[in-house]
Image (cartoon, rainbow, N blue to C red):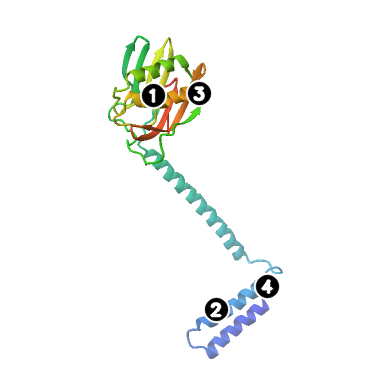
Amino acid sequence: MLILGFLSAFSNSFTWARAPPMTPPGLKFTLAATLGLLASLTHESCPQPAIALGLKHSAKNLAMIFKFNAALILSTLAFFQACASPVADASDLVVLSTQETANGTITIWGYPDGASKRADTLEKRQCGGNAITCSGSHTADVNSCRQLISSLSSNSGSGLGTSPRSICTTQNGNQCCVSWADAVSGLTQGDLVDAAQEIMNDCGGSSVSGLSRDTDLNGVCTTQCLSNRADGCTS
């Protein structure tokens, strides 16, 4: 402290005796650097002033507040992005039509007119590979699924429109559904056969459940599913 006082007094006397009314920046910088060096050398032996400790704690608090605010902003943006998504909830599916056949009931499920739907056009990427993933849940009777695929093939030229998301057949109380994740314009029942048959071939036993990713449905790259439920097929 004695040294610091001496230097401070020396600085003041030097400024009044030699310097003009405004002390040159270089001199201020030199004296400040000297004082800082002496303070750092005596740091180990001298306790830190309370104001320095307060500044350290304030800096830590500011850093924590900054991190918290950043996380809050990111989570808020994610929330609004999810809310802005045009994808309708699968639970909103309604029965669009039913048809009684000799081999069971054919039911077409979809979104009512005016419901929000994903855009028909997706970003172009490698598609048509039909990457199959089998599942142990929501399994459907394999005979009902065979009948469904047979019906799709028999009505291959029948158009479905944009609203539908699944076609199901119910046979002896057993339901099998082929469903897809995205709205597809100009879709026909025949477009659904290839991926459904590949899921049957890879996942079928006495029952079957699975999905086909990167499936090309009339130019739309989407996911197609085969299971016992009309909804739940997402990209």
From the image, tell me which residue sits under label 1. 193
Nearer to us of marks 4 and 3 is 3
Q: Label 1 to label 4, Cα distance in Å?
A: 81 Å
Residue 204 shown left or right of residue 114 in the figure: right
Mark 4 crowdedness (10 Å alpha carbons): few <14, some 14-19, many ≥20: few
66 or 195: nearer the eye? 195
Q: Label 4 to label 3, Cα distance in Å?
A: 74 Å
Query: What amino acid is at disc 1?
Result: Val
Sequence-earlier tag: 3 or 2: 2
Mark 1 crowdedness (10 Å alpha carbons): few <14, some 14-19, many ≥20: some
Evaluate if marks 1 and 2 touch, with contact meaning CB atoms under 8 Å apart. Answer: no
From the image, tell me which residue sits under label 2. 29
From the image, tell me which residue sits under label 4. 41
Label for residue 203? 3
Sequence-earlier tag: 1 or 4: 4
User: Measured along the vertical axis of the image, is residue 213 above or below residue 43?
Assistant: above
